[in-house]
Amino acid sequence: MSEEYGANFITVTDEEGNEFELEHLDTIEFNGTTYLAFFPAVSEDQEEDGEEDLGLILMKVIQENGEELLSTLDSEEETDAVYNEFMKILFEDEEEE
């Protein structure tokens, strides 16, 4: 994990070996699975270059060989359901303020 961003940031590597910095926003339990929401981290250099924001990234925790790993979601239906659950929680929090 890069210390450039702080404690709420992680580095993930895709199947092609590309590394990405992500900012962790929230974690929920939904239908027996743990899901995490992230935004792509943008450094000051990227902000100055005007690079585009990629939007919300949803990942889930899976068990592989006794180890917890982050994985992409399996289907568009799963993505839609988890996205809607995160939005419901976000709007509930805003209404309480």
Image (cartoon, helix red, strand yellow):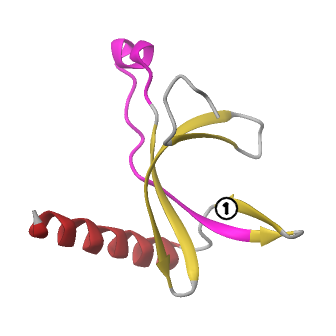
Q: Nearer the viewer, residue 58 or 29?
A: 29
Asked which quadrant contains residue 39, the reply is: top left
Residue 15, how many percent across, how many down?
A: 76, 46
Mark 1: amino acid:
Ser
Let me know if residue 50 is in the magenta part.
yes
Residue 52, how many percent across, how many down?
A: 38, 30
Asked which quadrant contains residue 94, the reply is: bottom left
Q: Secondary structure at mark 1?
A: strand
Seen at 58% across and 26% down, the residue is 3
Q: Nearer the viewer, residue 76 or 26?
A: 26
Residue most toward the right? 65
Q: Nearer the viewer, residue 71 or 91?
A: 91
Seen at 62% across and 72% down, the residue is 74
Q: If the image is split into quadrants, where does the C terminus sit?
A: bottom left
Residue 35, how many percent across, how many down?
A: 53, 68
Seen at 44% across and 21% down, the residue is 43
Q: If the image is split into quadrants, where does the N terminus sit?
A: top right
Judge from the rendering whether residue 5 lies leftward or rightward of residue 96; answer left or right. right
Q: Which residue is mark 1?
A: 71
Which segment is the magenta one? 42-62
Asked if residue 43 is positioned above or below residue 38 in the image, the reply reads above
Judge from the rendering whether residue 61 lies leftward or rightward of residue 68; answer left or right. left
Residue 88, how many percent across, how many down?
A: 26, 74
Asked which quadrant contains residue 70, the reply is: bottom right
Asked if residue 43 is positioned above or below residue 13 in the image, the reply reads above
